[in-house]
Image (cartoon, rainbow, N blue to C red):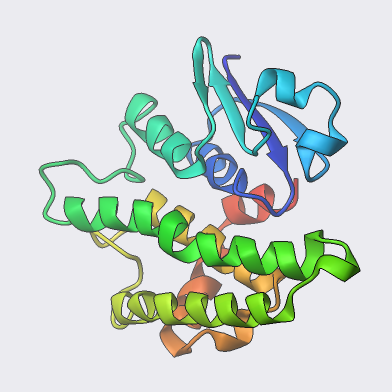
Amino acid sequence: MSLKLWHCATSRSIRPLWTMEEMQLPYELLVMQFPPRFMHTGYTDINPIGTVPYFTDGTVEMTESTAISQYLVDCYGPTDLAVASDESDYGVYLNWLHRSDTTLTFPQTLVLRYSHLESEDRRLPQVVEDYSKWFYSRLRSLEVAVTGREYLCSGRFTIADISVGFALYLAEKLGLRDGFKEYTNAYYERLKKRPAFHKATSL
């Protein structure tokens, strides 16, 4: 077995874990407490930046969750989870892969930090409020994208849905789901019904 993933519950590592479950790939999973750089002795020796996920495939080492998912579909396909460069929605697919983290998950990390991770005296309600609003404003593009369509691109479920789906899952965990609009909420419910989603979010 060559695929190995270091994972924390409710973290970005859900993206590659969900991808491997959808593809039914064999893998080794190391489950850690969050944050692993403090809770898992020796983790920074393996991954100096201390973030999660950390992924290896033989000599390949990766730390970016969406990039790992893309690596998996490109190297272990063919799979309908990928969108090929000759498909009309290829640009849409790439845009959602990158938007999922840089636009949707980024403001959530600040909400998470200043509402849960920092000590009580260092929590900043104004930051939580401001970046919650930022997240909701960026979520408008998703509401438009899933109005009248089941998935984000190419008429099928892909890793773009996995990447964005994690952002919605994290939002729910942070108490932000009340801000989902009608079609975003229905889209998220479709994603949550997938067996691989249940497996990835329960480990």
- Judged left or right of residue 148, residue 167 is right
Of residue 21 and residue 144, the one placed in the foreground of this image is 144
Residue at 61% x, 43% y is: 13
Camera sees residue 158 = no
Count of marks placed on residues: 0
Residue 82 appears in view: yes
**Image position of 41 (left or right of 175):** right
In the image, residue 8 lies at what x, y percent? 73, 43
Which residue is at a point 78% across and 44% down the rendered structure image? Answer: 35
Quadrant of the rendering where the C terminus is positioned: top right
Q: Quadrant of residue 67?
A: top left
Residue 63: x %, y % from top left = 54, 33
Q: Position of residue 1 (x, y in %)?
A: 60, 14
Q: Is 36 situated left or right of 167 in this image?
A: right
Compared to 12, does 117 lie above or below?
Answer: below
Q: Write the residue at 45% across / 44% down.
A: 66
Q: Residue furthest front?
A: 121
Picture coordinates of residue 91, whole percent (x, y):
18, 53
Question: Residue at 65% of width from left, 25% of height from top?
Answer: 48
- Furthest-top residue in view? 59
Name the side, left or right, on which 168 lies relative to 95: right
Which is nearer the eye, 73 or 48? 48
